[in-house]
Image (spheres, rainbow, N blue to C red):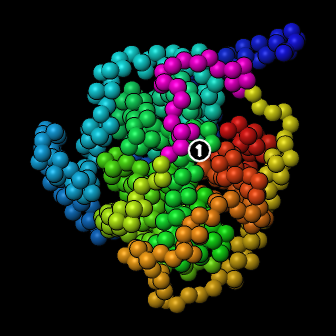
Amino acid sequence: MMTEEELTEKRILVERANVEREAIFKRYDGGRKNIDIDAWDDPAFEIYTQADRYGFLHPEKEQTYRDDLEAIRRKQIEVERTKKWLKMRKNWTSADTKERLQRRVMKGIPDRLRAAIWKLFLNLDKTLEENAGVYDKMLKFARQYSPDIRQIDFDVNRQFRNHINYRDRYSVKQQSLFRVLAAYSMYNMEVGYCQGMSTVAGVLLMYFDEEDTFWALNALLSNERYAMHGLYVEGFPKLMRFLQHHDKILTKCMPKVKKHLDKHGVDSVLYSLKWFFVIFIERIPFSLCLRVWDIYMLYGERVLTAMAFTILKIHKVKILRMKDMDQITEFLQTTLYKNFGYDDDTVIKTLQLAMFDLKKLNLDKLPPPPVSEFPKVPFGQFIEPSLEAKIGHRNEKFTERETELKETVLYRSESKNDEDDDNAGENGHRDENGDDDDRTERDCDDITEEDDAYSNLNTVVPLTPRFRRLHPLTKGVSMSSLRTIQSFTTLDTSTSLATSLNSLVIIDSFDENCDNMIEEITRL
């Protein structure tokens, strides 16, 4: 029971949080008219000179004649496919469309029709009709009550900073992204807001308007085909299932790769978070990622496990030649995003085969979900946040774990260059031909008892200095300037992986005040 003095203090803090939330909303209301936009908020345009077809900005690079010819060829193919898709769209419920749909999705949805086809996959028109006025209502609730506004505001300006529509602070797209996430934090109060949702919503906003994006995000979380609610709810139970199932697939179908990763301390949590958490955004080239999203919209969650398997399968020989944990994680987290090494059509064909093979082995689907993954309360049902939630309560003192983490961050940042020099001379060599796995996908029916025992190993790993080091999970930037989802884990025999993943955060710069960084970590 709180004393009168404590209650008065809480009321003051709640009022302060209300003022802060309203101030944030007003800045988004004002958009680019705000006069106090920090210089950091707008990346210097001079470093970019061209935008790709998806709106991402890139430094100038000389176009080759071969690139021009390939672009012309792809444009011609897409024009022909657009005609076929337009015809299918007009006859969406026909038997002919159902027969052709899967094959044509694998070939790729034309970008100009992607919004219309995704809308059909997610059944958005019906949802909008049945929920008229709900979005505006949730937005009003968010303005009054949402405890997540400060974090949403923080993340919105870190999302797709190299995209032409998101780069300017309080731009139209930033305003829309903020409102979508704020409204959804009240519509699905069990999840509220989780980092990673801004990435998914940001991609949806590239194709939909604001309200459509809100309901598309809800479809991905609530529709049983995708069921992303379990990915973002407290404890990340579905993420745990994805990681365990991924390890099982590797153990049975790529045992040599699995043992190689284990040997070098590369737990799947280190490289696959963005594969499952945000559907491969910023882990593979965006054009390829959209092709995966197309297939995901049609088939659902089993596409994610198949694509994760495909990435390791297609790059198996390269991975087996790597002899260092940092080298492997750098390759999977950064290198493949810049240059995947294979054209999109080749990768999608490999993905299609992987889906077929995994289905044949009864490994295409995750194990049944626990009750904890499902919503416990109806969406759109308002529950007044607690005092701590309204205040945005944070511990004033660091725990022992947080202090250790802070020291680890500083140590890792300072020692990275020395480590790279030491590791340069330690890399071993492998036969140029690269030994294949003892058993490929087609041999997986013959599974030994040893394999089954291996696949049931607990995902908890010992706490070692090497494992505790931080690893960059994005875009090849230096350790002193990261913008990525990171996993700060303190795993030991008494700490579950689910508990450790509650420290999932986005880090912007190691040069910023480390205390503030730890504060953001502990908030989740």
Tell me the quarter of the image containing the C terminus: top right
Above or below: residue 144 compared with residue 249: above
Give the class, few, some or many, for how many residues have Cα within 10 Å of label 1's Cα (few <14, many ≥20): many
SS majority, magenta? loop
Magenta-colored stretch includes residue 264: no
> Which residue ends up furthest to the front in the rendered image?
449
Depth order, front residue of 102/406: 102
Left or right of 318 on screen, residue 2:
right
Image coords of residue 438 (percent x, y): 48, 83
Element type at mark 1: loop
Q: Residue at x 65, y 48 (%)?
A: 498
- State whether residue 51 appears in this view: no
Q: Which residues are magenta?
A: 369-392
Image coords of residue 162 (percent x, y): 49, 47
Left or right of 128 on screen, residue 521:
right
Q: Label 1 belongs to which residue?
A: 236
Q: Residue at x 69, y 20 (%)?
A: 386
Above or below: residue 314 compared with residue 304: below
Of the residues shown, which amino acid type is indicated by label 1? Answer: Phe
